[in-house]
Image (spheres, rainbow, N blue to C red):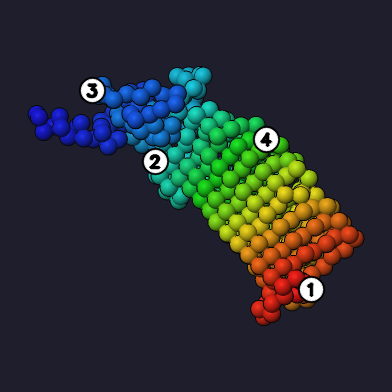
């Protein structure tokens, strides 16, 4: 009997509860905590011992979803129960998906402080064919799962974060299959959002992987992997005073048969929009229309560091600046086909490049645009201290 009691105590301590699949959330004791959560040195018998970080991720109150052996068979059912138990949504809750495939056939608003957590990319898979299946609220998260979005209607959005704070997307794979339709993987409007280890693949007529807009939008993008075939659009678009930081990522767009909307991998626009791109590889392959891997228009606070920008096919500049944009580039490689300019500054734009490699034809400035180079080499590593090769 004593051994059994010790075993149960050990299981509770490491987070495995005999009542793990109970519909009623488990009682918890938050230890070593601070801030709004009162610190407790001693936990009452039968409660789970959680750190403040675990508690903030909703591990203290878990709703299990599985086709078999769990109280809830669908994500919608779990959300309905959570809304009935916690209408104020003032504390973190977790919806835990088992390995398997889950169908979403209605628009789901993820309540505040709710994290939907799967068993990993490819293990827990959400399939949906409806427009706008996920709308995020404050302090919500989608983690460790795959979402297959297959839309039949025009202009569809897979995930939305409108006017929210504290939204997290972590270790998520989004696959798309819309070769004749418009597709938006994630749209962020006036929200603070973190994206970490996000993979997006597939094909779409007009495409945007991450669309960021609004003066209150602050978005951190880390370890993105995007590879999509499209007739036009952007992998990442930032506008209307938003702020983005893109790091440690690999992004590749390939133009389909006939671009109906000239593609750019990244588009940054509007004078108050800010962007930083660091340690990232960005590639565009096109066959029909002029395009730019990174296109900056009007924005005056854009910095590119230690990154690689490549454009294969007709281009007006792998890195193109226009309409009074101000862009600074440091320690990067910018390359285009041999007959095309690697960088261009149009319509009073200012482009400053230092300690970088320009691979392609000569730089191109037009209608008041200026390009300043310092410590630059060409593709043959011919060095130029103060002029553009």
Is 4 placed left or right of 25 in the picture? left
Residue 251 percent coordinates (x, y): 61, 59
Tell whether label 3 touches label 4 (CB within 8 Å).
no
Label 4, on which residue?
A: 216
Q: Which mark is residue 45?
A: 3
Q: Whole-Å distance between the Cαs marked 2 and 4? A: 35 Å
Q: Residue at 90% of width from left, 60% of height from top?
A: 367
Mark 3 secondary-structure assignment = loop
Q: Whole-Å distance between the Cαs marked 2 and 3? A: 28 Å
Above/below status of 363 relative to 24: below
Residue 387 seen in this snapshot: yes
Above/below status of 326 relative to 384: above
Mark 1 secondary-structure assignment = loop
Mark 4 secondary-structure assignment = loop
Q: Which mark is residue 2?
A: none
Name, please, the residue furthest toward the front.
385
Above/below status of 67 relative to 122: above
Label 2, on which residue?
A: 98
Q: Residue at 53% of width from left, 39% of height from top?
A: 168
Residue 110 percent coordinates (x, y): 54, 31
Viewer-nearest of discs 4 and 3: 4
Viewer-nearest of discs 2 and 3: 3
């Amino acid at each position: 009997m004593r051994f059994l009691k010790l075993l149960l105590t050990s299981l509770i301590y490491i987070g495995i509860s005999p009542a793990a699949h109970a519909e009623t959330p488990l009682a918890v004791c938050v230890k070593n905590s601070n801030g709004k959560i009162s610190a407790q040195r001693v936990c009452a018998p039968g409660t789970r011992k959680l750190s403040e970080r675990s508690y903030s991720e909703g591990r203290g109150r878990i709703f299990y979803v599985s086709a078999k052996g769990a109280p809830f068979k669908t994500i919608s059912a779990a959300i309905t129960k959570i809304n009935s138990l916690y209408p104020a949504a003032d504390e973190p809750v977790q919806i835990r998906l088992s390995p398997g495939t889950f169908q979403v056939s209605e628009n789901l608003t993820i309540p505040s402080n709710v994290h939907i957590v799967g068993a990993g990319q490819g293990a827990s898979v959400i399939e949906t064919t409806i427009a706008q299946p996920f709308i995020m609220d404050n302090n919500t998260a989608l983690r460790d799962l795959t979402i297959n979005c297959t839309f039949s209607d025009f202009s569809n959005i897979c995930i939305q974060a409108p006017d929210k704070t504290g939204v997290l997307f972590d270790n998520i794979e989004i696959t798309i299959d819309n070769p004749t339709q418009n597709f938006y993987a994630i749209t962020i409007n006036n929200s603070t959002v973190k994206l970490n280890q996000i993979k997006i693949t597939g094909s779409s007529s007009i495409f945007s992987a991450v669309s960021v807009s609004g003066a209150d939008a602050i978005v951190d993008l880390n370890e993105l992997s995007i590879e999509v075939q499209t007739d036009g659009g952007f992998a990442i678009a930032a506008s209307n005073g938003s702020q983005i930081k893109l790091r440690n990522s690999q992004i590749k767009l390939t133009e389909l048969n006939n671009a109906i909307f000239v593609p750019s991998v990244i588009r940054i626009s509007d004078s108050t929009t800010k962007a930083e791109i660091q340690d990232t590889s960005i590639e565009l392959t096109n066959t029909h229309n002029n395009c730019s891997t990174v296109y900056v228009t009007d924005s005056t606070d854009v910095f590119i560091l230690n990154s690689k920008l490549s454009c294969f096919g007709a281009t007006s500049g792998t890195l193109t600046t226009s309409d009074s944009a101000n862009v600074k580039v440091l320690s990067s490689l910018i390359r285009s086909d041999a007959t095309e300019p690697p960088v261009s500054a149009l319509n009073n734009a200012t482009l400053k490049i230092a300690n970088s490699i320009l691979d392609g034809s000569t730089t191109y400035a037009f209608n008041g645009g200026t390009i300043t180079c310092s410590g630059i080499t060409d593709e043959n590593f011919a060095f130029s201290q103060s002029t553009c090769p």
